Image (cartoon, helix red, strand yellow):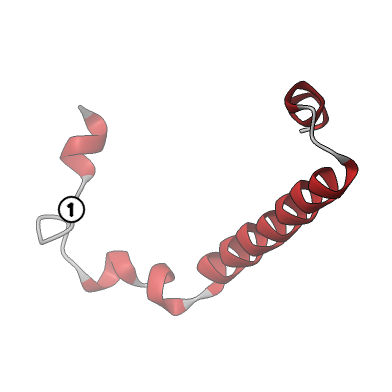
């Protein structure tokens, strides 16, 4: 990010805004990943749908 900000010639105020945005997005994505890894919604998905049922992507992913 520092190289991109420098290349764009952003003033200090806008650089700070970019830094804050990046920090917030990193925290949000990290939190979502932690939630997704622990929630029953995703942990039990393979047990609820048969591999040949709706939403099965095994054939697509193996192609």
Residue at the image position 82 percent from the left and 26 percent from the top: 6
Q: Considering depth in this image, is 5 or 35 the residue closer to the camera?
A: 5
For label 1, the crowd category at 10 Å Cα-Cα, with few meaning under 14, some 14 to 19 and many 20 or more, is few
**Count of numbered circles on the image:** 1
Residue at the image position 86 percent from the left and 49 percent from the top: 13
Residue 42 pos. (x, y %): 40, 68
Residue 33 pos. (x, y %): 58, 61
Quarter placement of the N terminus: top right
Q: Considering depth in this image, is 46 or 16 the residue closer to the camera?
A: 16
Q: Residue furthest right?
A: 12
Image side of residue 14 versus residue 58, left or right: right
Residue 2 sits in quarter:
top right
Q: Residue furthest bottom?
A: 40
Q: Considering depth in this image, is 44 or 20 the residue closer to the camera?
A: 20
Image side of residue 46 versus residue 7, left or right: left
Quarter placement of the C terminus: top left
Where 10 falls versus 28 (above or below)?
A: above
Residue at disc 1, secondary structure: loop
Residue 56 pos. (x, y %): 18, 53
Q: Considering depth in this image, is 27 or 41 the residue closer to the camera?
A: 27
Q: Residue at label 1?
A: 56
Image side of residue 49 versus residue 24, left or right: left
Residue at the image position 79 percent from the left and 46 percent from the top: 14
Where 36 falls versus 57 (above or below)?
A: below
Residue 22 pos. (x, y %): 72, 50
């Amino acid at each position: 990010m520092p190289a991109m900000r420098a290349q764009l010639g952003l003033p200090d105020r806008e650089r700070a805004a970019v830094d804050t945005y990046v920090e917030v997005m990193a925290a949000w994505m990290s939190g979502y990943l932690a939630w997704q890894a622990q929630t029953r919604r995703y942990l039990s998905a393979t047990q609820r749908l048969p591999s040949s049922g709706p939403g099965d992507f095994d054939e697509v992913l193996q192609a």
